[in-house]
Image: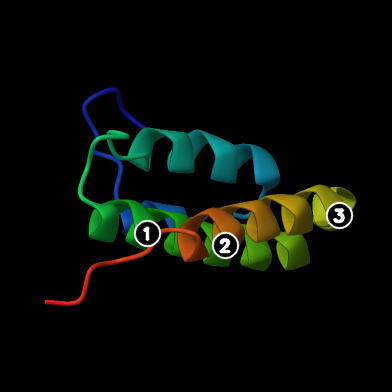
C-alpha cells in the first residue's frame, strides 16, 4: 500500500490476517469525540471484520474472536438518542 493511499472500509473488507485487521482498523478509528452514530458504526463494522478474520487467520482464531467480541460490546454500549 502506498503512503498516499487512503484507508477505506473496502480495504478493511479485504484483510485476511489479524495483523492486517489491526493495522487497517486502527487507521479507520474515528476521533473519540465523534458523534455516537459514527463511533457505534465503527465498532460494529470493526467487530464484523475481526469475526471474519477469525475464520481466515486460523492461527489467531481465538484472539480474533476476542477482538470481535470486544468491538461488538463497545459498539452495543453506545446508546443513540431517538429523534
Q: Mark 3 or mark 2, which has the lower sequence index?
A: 3
Query: Residue 71 at what x, y percent from top left?
Result: 57, 54
Q: Mark 2 or mark 1, which has the lower sequence index?
A: 1
In the rendered structure, are the residues bearing label 3 and label 1 in contact, judged by CB atoms less than 8 Å apart? Answer: no
- Which residue is identified by label 2? 72
Dot 3 crowding, Cα within 10 Å, few <14, some 14–19, many 20+: some
Residue in the picture at 45% in, 35% down: 26
Query: Residue 53 at what x, y percent from top left?
Result: 67, 59
In the rendered structure, are the residues bearing label 2 and label 1 in contact, judged by CB atoms less than 8 Å apart? Answer: no
Helix, strand or loop at label 3? It is helix
Helix, strand or loop at label 2? It is helix
Above-or-below relation of 43 to 1? below
- Left or right: where does residue 22 sit relative to residue 7? right
Q: How far apart are marks 3 and 1 (CA)?
A: 23 Å
Q: Distance between the residues labelled 2 and 1?
A: 9 Å
Nearer the observer, 76 or 15: 76
The quadrant of the image that shows the N terminus is top left
Q: Is residue 13 visible?
A: no
Nearer the observer, 41 or 14: 41
**Residue projecting furthest to the left:** 83
Above-or-below relation of 17 to 26? below
- Which residue is identified by label 1? 40
Q: Mark 3 or mark 1, which has the lower sequence index?
A: 1
Residue in the picture at 23% in, 68% down: 81
- Which residue is identified by label 3? 62
The residue mark sitting in front, 3 or 2, is 2
Dot 2 crowding, Cα within 10 Å, few <14, some 14–19, many 20+: many
Query: Residue 40 at what x, y percent from top left?
Result: 37, 59
Amino acid at each position: 500500500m502506498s503512503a498516499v493511499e487512503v484507508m477505506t472500509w473496502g480495504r478493511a473488507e479485504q484483510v485476511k490476517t489479524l495483523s492486517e485487521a489491526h493495522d487497517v482498523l486502527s487507521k479507520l478509528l474515528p476521533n473519540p469525540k465523534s458523534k455516537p452514530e459514527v463511533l457505534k458504526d465503527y465498532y460494529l463494522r470493526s467487530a464484523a471484520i475481526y469475526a471474519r478474520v477469525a475464520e481466515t487467520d486460523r492461527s489467531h482464531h481465538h484472539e480474533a474472536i476476542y477482538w470481535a467480541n470486544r468491538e461488538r460490546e463497545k459498539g452495543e454500549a453506545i446508546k443513540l438518542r431517538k429523534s
